[in-house]
Amino acid sequence: MNLIHRVGAVNRLNEETFLMTIDSPEIAAAGRPGQFVNIRCGGPDAYLRRPISICRIDRERGTFDIGVQIRGKGTEALSRMRPMEPIDIMGPLGNGFSLKPEDRRIAVVGGGIGVFPLLQLLIEHPASEKLALLGFRSRDQVVLEQDFQMACDELLIATDDGSYGTAGFVTSLLEKKLGEKTFDRVFICGPTPMMKRAAAILLERNVPCEVSLEQRMGCGIGACLVCACKTRAGDDWDYAHVCKDGPVFSGEAVIFD
Amino acid sequence: MNLIHRVGAVNRLNEETFLMTIDSPEIAAAGRPGQFVNIRCGGPDAYLRRPISICRIDRERGTFDIGVQIRGKGTEALSRMRPMEPIDIMGPLGNGFSLKPEDRRIAVVGGGIGVFPLLQLLIEHPASEKLALLGFRSRDQVVLEQDFQMACDELLIATDDGSYGTAGFVTSLLEKKLGEKTFDRVFICGPTPMMKRAAAILLERNVPCEVSLEQRMGCGIGACLVCACKTRAGDDWDYAHVCKDGPVFSGEAVIFD
Amino acid sequence: MMEKKTDMSVNIAGLKLKNPVIAASGTFGFGREYSALFDLSRLGGIAVKGLTLEPRKGNPPPRIAETPSGILNSVGLQNPGVHAFIRDEIPFLRRYDTAIIANASGNTVEEYEEMVRILSDADVDAIELNLSCPNVKEGCMAFGSTAAGITQVVSRVKPFCKKPLIVKLTPNVTDICELALAAEAAGADAVSLINTLLGMAIDVKTRRPILGNIMGGLSGPAVKPVALRMVYQVSKVVKIPVIGMGGISNGTDVVEFLLAGASAVMIGTAGFVNPYAWVEAINGLEQYMLENNCRSVAELTGGLIV
Amino acid sequence: MMEKKTDMSVNIAGLKLKNPVIAASGTFGFGREYSALFDLSRLGGIAVKGLTLEPRKGNPPPRIAETPSGILNSVGLQNPGVHAFIRDEIPFLRRYDTAIIANASGNTVEEYEEMVRILSDADVDAIELNLSCPNVKEGCMAFGSTAAGITQVVSRVKPFCKKPLIVKLTPNVTDICELALAAEAAGADAVSLINTLLGMAIDVKTRRPILGNIMGGLSGPAVKPVALRMVYQVSKVVKIPVIGMGGISNGTDVVEFLLAGASAVMIGTAGFVNPYAWVEAINGLEQYMLENNCRSVAELTGGLIV
Ligand SMILES: Cc1cc2nc3c(=O)[nH]c(=O)nc-3n(C[C@H](O)[C@H](O)[C@H](O)COP(=O)(O)OP(=O)(O)OC[C@H]3O[C@@H](n4cnc5c(N)ncnc54)[C@H](O)[C@@H]3O)c2cc1C
Ligand SMILES: Cc1cc2nc3c(=O)[nH]c(=O)nc-3n(C[C@H](O)[C@H](O)[C@H](O)COP(=O)(O)OP(=O)(O)OC[C@H]3O[C@@H](n4cnc5c(N)ncnc54)[C@H](O)[C@@H]3O)c2cc1C
Ligand SMILES: Cc1cc2nc3c(=O)[nH]c(=O)nc-3n(C[C@H](O)[C@H](O)[C@H](O)COP(=O)(O)O)c2cc1C
Ligand SMILES: Cc1cc2nc3c(=O)[nH]c(=O)nc-3n(C[C@H](O)[C@H](O)[C@H](O)COP(=O)(O)O)c2cc1C
Ligand code: FES
Ligand code: FES
């Protein structure tokens, strides 16, 4: 696996979020929606790599985009990288969302930075009808609206404070939409409470769904077993590992607690 | 003390040595020859500051130069800093060389990177006759020759392998010169064996000398006591501290062992 | 309505500090050098360089090695002796409105007793018994690494101690709680921890140890997780206040130690990298308290939710 | 004249390794994941994920926290059990020309014995007894932190052990030499050290520990000075080979551990940051040996000049 790639464009999306293009024909060719990359961000204190989802892939140009929210030392260091700088990335990693031809009508439900992996999914999914429900804290947190617009048939946005789109949680949008129609599969990514709620809503209505989980990681490839998440195993439960068994899991499999 | 200064020009002197100008009216105004600054070099692994001598001061422009040899993580990170970048420097620190009007005839004896602090000393010293004896490993290690030439009356260079100037050690040059004339004071900076030898030669002939010592440092200001060096204390000895009592010591005071 | 300002003061077994940030012993000398950089009155207190009965020269150089996110030191208690401290340094330190904590070491139990007797009559605010220095052959760690040793020293000095008595513990032990409990039982008014972790660095070019003394004490951010764990463990078992230290570099780190159970903290190594670390940590703590509506430091102490 | 190539091989009490670099237990799984990145036959050996008699689920997440130049982990020995290992993993590992070291833990002395009996009849090259895991409640650290505990376990399993027996020591003790000597006396063929230092990390925003299990084991470059010191101390007192580890990231670090007294080394955490750390360390060691005219690894072992 080649680790050294190159930073392309870096664009601020809002005060704390940026979109970074990475030049990497290898990752662009191999990457699938829902997979992630593990980035060595540098900076004196960010020892471990940071897992970041693949947000969009341009296979012709051999580049892919990541959308990143600055949270701590690592993402902060990452945000200061400049075009043309070398960047140390392992990827693509993890399993990605399912792309089944028989899923004709799909929806994505994204919250905050959880929207990022859903973009490439919408772009690439073979479904004939695609709905995107995205939730943000407020108007200034809304990102990639146009890009999502172009990648789906209908885009609905909810903001917690009502400063843009519908006021309230994206899960309410989901419930409302489910009153109107059903879906062959729904893909969810966002804060855990949101995913838990959304998955519950869908399971209740027997709509299959996939969720993309987050967990702190070590190796990023399945060797160290630190990125555990609780999943159903028959009548019992077990720990699966987000980096290798996920980050995408079927909604029924995950035990949110 | 203001810690944040700005990198000016950075010029390679040879493969492993560079000269860096720092914009800092404060340090330029307060700095004296032989004093040093303590630099936070950055880079993931260079935790401590690095002590580096003041090499030249331009008080009008409010800048000073340092000459640095790349040895490890810190100096390596320092070498990658670019003009206009902010740089975290404590200084000026330490005591510096004596600048006595009664010292009419002086010589400096420098070896390798030990030549750097001697440049500003030559520039600023009030003596009427100034000799510079500089030793390097080989021709490609010779640095700042012109600058030294302009700052003294006579410059002699020795190289270990004879590829430039006189073949042999700079201490041999010193012995030869002492056969011709004497000096009111001699200033020495370089590898420990060289300083030990030079000081011995001079003490034998009752020529006062000053040596600039190196030691690994913590605080850089005299509080932590890590930068100990052995000095005479009456009939006994004691540990003095390079950062506060030095880096310049009188040749008689130091116990080289 | 009057706005209630955040109260930063703490009271450690009778030792009143205006804020919980103390300069750690051995990293701050007797304050003179840092007084040129900032007003020492900003500090909660100053634990002065480790004192012994007689002056000590300390260990051969090099006395410091850089390690990943930390340092090793092997100063070996170089100090002018307790009498010179009282004569030359206390008057200087008293010019500032900050607590003076005398850090005392001895080679024998008798010497510890003598030190405590002398310091009890000196103008210091507390005595910190260093039972944990890894850099000297006799005394110190020898006493400090067993509960019996701690009991022996602390119970011996306690009757003569007229100041709050802080016992400083070494982390180089199997069970730090046992040591803290021994100190408490023998009369310590507080414990401080951690001193340095014994470590070593090697130069592959020369094939020699970097430190003149071969081994040295590890401090700085690298040790913070160990220090935090020990503060957490100890503060759960003792009733006396715990002063936490080990790798603290800023206000966030201070809050972590308080949450883990510390009543005050000390900062050392971080000051070598950032000479304003102490002041910035105080400011950072205050800001955290304001942002989180903490009225007092005590509200944070032991506030970890588990 | 034939040029003599540097000989990288080592022999640890009958365990022959083509080079002294082993993947540390728990950081390398059973090799499958890294086999996609490089040829496992490059490695001197692989210490597989810590095994127990029964499958174990391990501790609740989060199981990792980043610390300055290191990490804390609290995996808690999640593993499929020794039988699944023998059935499913050994055949895979045997495809590569590298030594298989089975890392074994037990809750009781009986379990340790049972593990050693089972693994003695399995196709592994050595057994590493994990007497030092800080992340499980019973067993392990409990036995591993006293000489008596080590003596008890090691002398119990030794008669049944048909493979080189490596005893892995915990650094969370007052005197690591005492433990190493106890292991040696009870029949260990080698000791490996260090396991992780017990530590903790706190999130000041949530006021909770970062790890689901509150405390965890510190590893990575931060612990290197402590590990190096312990390897130095232990190798001076035992006659059996010492396998050194703790924060090794590259060839230079490997040389440091060899000079301190190690006969081989293990690398773990560094591989999370650089998945080629093991291979690069082997290359780096070889380069050092060539540049310094070392004919064999044994020439470096214990070669520190003090
Ligand atoms: C599969 C996956 C995909 C992700 N995709 C994205 C994305 O597309 N865009 C984006 O902005 N963020 C994404 N995240 C979250 C991102 O990894 C964290 O925000 C980031 O690691 C925080 O690092 P930091 O240095 O800023 O914060 P710090 O607090 O300094 O991080 C300290 C440590 O905690 C870990 N950590 C902290 N928060 C998280 C988290 N939420 N998940 C995993 N590890 C964490 C860090 O990796 C690091 O090891 C993803 C996480 C996972 C697991
Ligand atoms: C008073 C003084 C003035 C100096 N002036 C100059 C100068 O003008 N130009 C120049 O090139 N070098 C100078 N040096 C030496 C310079 O400080 C070291 O080369 C530098 O610290 C090495 O850092 P590193 O990160 O490259 O090496 P590393 O090996 O990574 O350093 C590891 C640690 O050892 C310390 N260290 C290593 N070598 C030395 C040394 N020789 N002296 C002190 N600490 C050391 C480092 O500061 C650091 O803490 C001076 C040293 C002192 C004490
Ligand atoms: C250079 C140096 C000298 C020290 N000297 C002493 C001392 O004399 N007495 C003492 O009790 N602790 C001494 N210590 C230990 C510190 O007080 C403190 O316990 C330790 O460094 C951990 O804190 P830190 O990581 O903030 O430095 C010294 C530490 C350093 C780095
Ligand atoms: C995630 C993780 C899991 C570990 N699991 C085990 C284990 O199962 N058995 C064991 O003996 N050591 C285990 N260790 C300890 C390592 O083998 C090693 O002793 C320690 O991490 C120090 O080496 P390092 O700094 O190179 O990682 C584990 C370490 C880590 C980081
Ligand atoms: S991060 Fe190592 S197993 Fe997932
Ligand atoms: S470096 Fe601290 S006293 Fe010199």
Image (spheres, coloured by chain):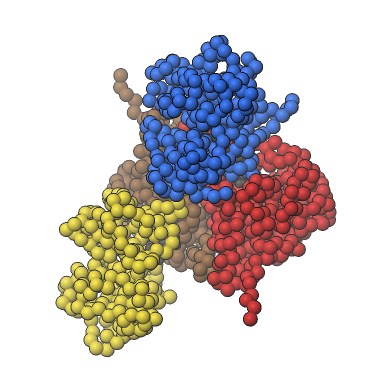
Chain colours: A blue, B yellow, C brown, D red
Q: Is residue C212 above or below residue C257?
A: below
At 39% from the left edge and 45% from the top edge, which residue is drawn? A83
At 54% from the left edge and 71% from the top edge, which residue is drawn? D291
Residue C158 visible: no
Quarter location, residue C229? top right
At 65% from the left edge and 69% from the top edge, which residue is drawn? D7
Residue D6 falls left or right of residue C161 = right
Asked whether A220 or B35 is in front, the reply is A220
Asked whether C168 or D78 is in front, the reply is D78
At 47% from the left edge and 20% from the top edge, which residue is drawn? A155
**Residue D152 rendering spot, x and y as whole percentages:** 77, 51
**Residue A132 rendering spot, x and y as whole percentages:** 50, 22
Residue D277 visible: yes
Q: Is residue C30 above or below residue B174?
A: above
**Residue A49 rendering spot, x and y as whole percentages:** 52, 44
Q: Quadrant of the N terminus of chain C?
A: top left
Figure quarter occupied by ligand 5: top right
Residue B246 falls left or right of residue C207 = left
